[in-house]
Amino acid sequence: LDQARDAVDAVLERLRAVPGVHRAERAGEARRGTEVVADVLAAAVVDVDAVPAVLAALDAAPGPERDGVPTLVTSGDTPVTIGLGHYADTFGALWLWLTGAPEHVQAVAARANERGGTLGPLGLHLAERRVACPDEDDVYAALDLHPTPPERREAGVPLVPRGEAAPRLLRREDLRGALHNHTTSSDGISSLEEMCAAANAAGLEYLGISEHSQTAAYAGGLDAGALRAQIATIAALNATRAAAGGTTVLSGIESDILKEGDLDYPDDVLAGLDVVIASVHNRYGLGRDGMTARMLAAAANPWVDVIGHPTGRLILGRPASEFDVEAWLDACAASGCAVELNANPQRLDLCERHLAMAKERGLLVSISADAHSAQALAHLDYGVVIARRAGLGPADVLNAKPLAELRAWLAERRARAAPGGSRNTPSPTRS
């Protein structure tokens, strides 16, 4: 997804600079936010006599028509197909058509048919007259529909008539913080101060620092002494920044979930943290029963606040771990721990299907950048896209809570973590 968006955005920047180009936007899967993009598309309004200049500026060639729409295809490692319209007042229909998905477009076209009209990429016609639709919202409005957000334009997502309330989906500005991030203290490349400055610039109220734990020695994991030292450093940083305001730093850890489902620190160490994220980083091949038992144990651990990148998948790289996801989500619901949507575009874990299942169970989702650099905090944008595809709203997202509400939620979980109530171990040798 990130590579497709980068490719189409680079083309759009050049395209918009060509005289005679009146509008140019993302379309297709890159706009809808599918985790893998097979066909990189854009839609544009271009004067007929400007097409040769566009071809030259983009090093593009004419492509095959799509439903009667002429196209251009750029060269390069990631070709971008641009659907061309020549009339600004029909761009909304063209953009909707090229954005898809086909099932959604067919549903909107059927709505037009029910009203005695037609919808195609060249325009919307009602009562035998062309309806001016310079934007997609004009198409939906003419058909008495709420606009469907691009992320929700998939099979099985119903159209919403104007007389009904449209669901309120999560927006980027709803995120108040990010809980899972790394610094140079483990395997990050930005310092604590640099991460804090970037979070402040991004308008985040709080930033969780959750380094790798002692089992993950390969990633610079922190032993108990180093973790306690970082807790003290974060407390001192917050104290010096208190008068100036800005982002509050929360002390955390990304503790490894060991083979039997326990964590790799004793309870007294975990008790000193603001937030505990638990993740699997090794031994993915335990089989369905073994991995299910491991994940159920982690979900039941009273010290675990969030389970990180739960399936362990890497998109187009490593398959998801095999375990009973429904049973695990039920266990999370029973214990009250949150589940992570890891927004690293190579992970996007949990996927939208599992996120929808989490929402059905009333689970909170922590949208995490898993940032290993200050720049990677921008991964939160991809998390919002996937959350929207799953139908999540602000009430479904842990880090949409203001800091005071988040602290209250964490404090309630700490109160439940009775001494001796878990099976955690300080041993860095267990895995």
Image (cartoon, grey):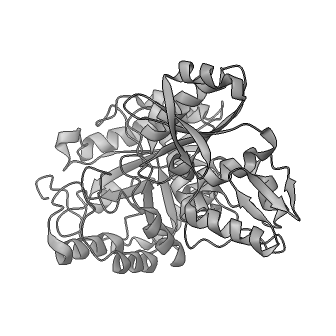
Which residue is drawn at the image coordinates 23% and 66% (left, top)? 262
Q: Nearer the viewer, residue 127 or 274?
A: 127
Vertical side of 360 occupied by 228: above or below: above
Which residue is drawn at the image coordinates 45% and 57% (left, top)? 341
Taking 1 as reference, is 285 left or right?
Answer: left
Position of residue 349 measured from the top left corner of the image (x, y, whole percent): 39, 57
Residue 407 in sight from this viewpoint: no
Q: Nearer the viewer, residue 237 or 141?
A: 141
Taking 320 as reference, is 408 left or right?
Answer: right
Vertical side of 376 occupied by 390: above or below: below
Position of residue 369 measured from the top left corner of the image (x, y, whole percent): 45, 45
Which residue is drawn at the image coordinates 33% and 38% (left, top)? 229
Residue 286 in sight from this viewpoint: yes
Q: Quadrant of the C terminus?
A: bottom left
Q: Nearer the viewer, residue 207 or 41?
A: 41
Total marks drawn?
0
Position of residue 123 measured from the top left corner of the image (x, y, whole percent): 75, 52
Vertical side of 27 occupied by 53: above or below: above
Vertical side of 22 occupied by 91: above or below: below
